[in-house]
Image (cartoon, rainbow, N blue to C red):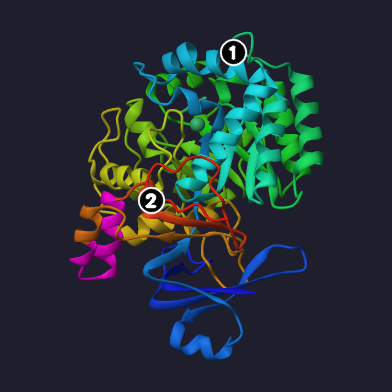
Amino acid sequence: MQAWRAACLAFDPEADHPIVHYESDGLLVAEPQSDGVWRVVARGPYAALRPQWPQVPVHDWRGRCIAPGFIDLHVHYPQTDIIGAPAEGLLPWLQRYTFVHEARLADPAYAQEVASFFLDEMLRQGVTTALTWATSHPASVEAVLEQAEARGLRWIAGKVLQDRHSPDGVRDDTEGSLRETEALIARWHGRRRLGYAITPRFAPSCSDAQLQGAGALAAAHPSVWVQSHVAENVDEVRWVRELYPHDRSYLAVYERFGLLRPRAVYAHGIYLDEVDHARLAATGAAVAVSPTSNLFLGSGFFDYAAARRAGVRLGLASDVGAGMSFSPFATMRAAYTVGRAAVRGDGAAKAAVSLTPEDLWWQHTAGAARAAGLAGVVGSLAVGSEADFIVLDPEATPLLKRRCAHAASLTEWLFAFIVLADDRAVAHVHVAGQPHNFTQRPSGRNEARA
Ligand code: GUN
Ligand code: ZN
């Protein structure tokens, strides 16, 4: 058993909106359970809790803040090495850089090396769980899940399905791809803290037979995740309309193949209409809002007001490598900016919203967990949940220190982090109660702990 004393930020794990629990002088107590995973056994004011746990060793981190590890709902680890590759839009970007680069992951040694860097970088930035894309090569899934297992992470990944409109080197074959997916599910899903995601790249890159097979696997394995892209870019949406003239919408294609259900997470979702939003809400499928990616590729601005009106589950995602940063602070900052926009990207108007810092933070922690079917497991620091947490340092940079000192409320303090913070503000990362030992050289004040 172990305890940590600091300010403590936590969320209600089940609520469909942010309910914050904050202690300025808090105590978090965790201990290993029968499965070996450390879970939170108590969380609350130090003065009230300490007498109940007098024997437990306490790390004194006063002046800092414990918070749930961030959850990234959509990220492509193989694209780590193509962040910032400029293109006129999604489809040229995929052709010119992405498919060309992803072909390199056919080399298992390269996949291992990228996966290792990627996981350490995610952790360094404070991300402790992610829905991760590999490539179409099964060994690329093995690489990232093996290394996630070695780090004790709750992590989800999947082999990309793309049997058409894809170049040699990444294109897979229909039957083989489904057999490989089934074998990867059997090998990885539910092993330690790992999960598998059935991963059709997007409707244009999958034949009917491949989508049908993906839907059959999704039905046979309800606890397995599904991840894909939807309605990201106007040219992409037009292309889907040409390829699937009989479907009501892009999202309807996925629904026809049984791919809308709880634990199905669709990135982007900019060009959805009211009916699409209602179908997402009714089926329990979620949207991974990916604002830095949408800004980088000029895809458009997510319509929070419309999605929320319909009750769509959503959370935040970096979508690296179209995304511009691994940092959850950068993603929350971009989400705020995008919320303020009054246009969608195709000429349609949308309501400008002013997302609160509590809401943005929730979308990257407990809200993301709820969207992905992991409520109460990670993302909240609720009692009973897994002890994945970060320790924030409000003095990480001179400006952050100065601004935090002037914060008149928790709201202002959180906003200071969203606007000013980066990896330097993540002083420690704990995975299932254990301090993560950064194997990379930290760039800032991350303190590697043995
Ligand atoms: N649509 C299909 N593949 C991709 C991808 O790799 N990134 C993004 N942003 N959109 C996609
Ligand atoms: Zn993506």
Which secondary structure lies at badge 2?
loop
Which of disc 1 and disc 2 is earlier in sequence?
1
**In front of the other: 441 or 213:** 441
Q: Where residue 82 sits in the image (x, y, percent)?
A: 46, 22
- The residue at the point 74 percent across, 63 percent down is 36
**In front of the other: 398 or 33:** 398
User: Which residue has dot 2 on it?
Assistant: 445
Does residue 363 appear left or right of residue 412 in this picture?
right
Compared to residue 142, the image places residue 38 above or below, namely below
Does residue 190 appear left or right of residue 65 in this picture?
right
User: Which residue has dot 1 on it?
Assistant: 166
Q: Where residue 258 sits in the image (x, y, percent)?
A: 67, 38
Q: Which residues are magenta?
A: 404-420
- The residue at the point 42 percent across, 21 percent down is 90
Compared to residue 157, the image places residue 309 above or below, namely below
Amino acid residing under circle 1: Ser
**Magenta residue check for 418:** yes
Amino acid residing under circle 2: Arg
**In front of the other: 156 or 219:** 156
Q: Where residue 243 sits in the image (x, y, percent)?
A: 54, 17
Residue 232 appears in the picture as rendered: yes
Q: Quadrant of the C terminus?
A: bottom right
Does residue 355 appear left or right of residue 244 in this picture?
left
Residue closest to the far top = 168
Does residue 189 appear left or right of residue 75 in this picture?
right
**In front of the other: 233 or 96:** 96
Which secondary structure lies at badge 1?
loop
- The residue at the point 60 percent across, 15 percent down is 103
Residue 136 appears in the picture as rendered: no
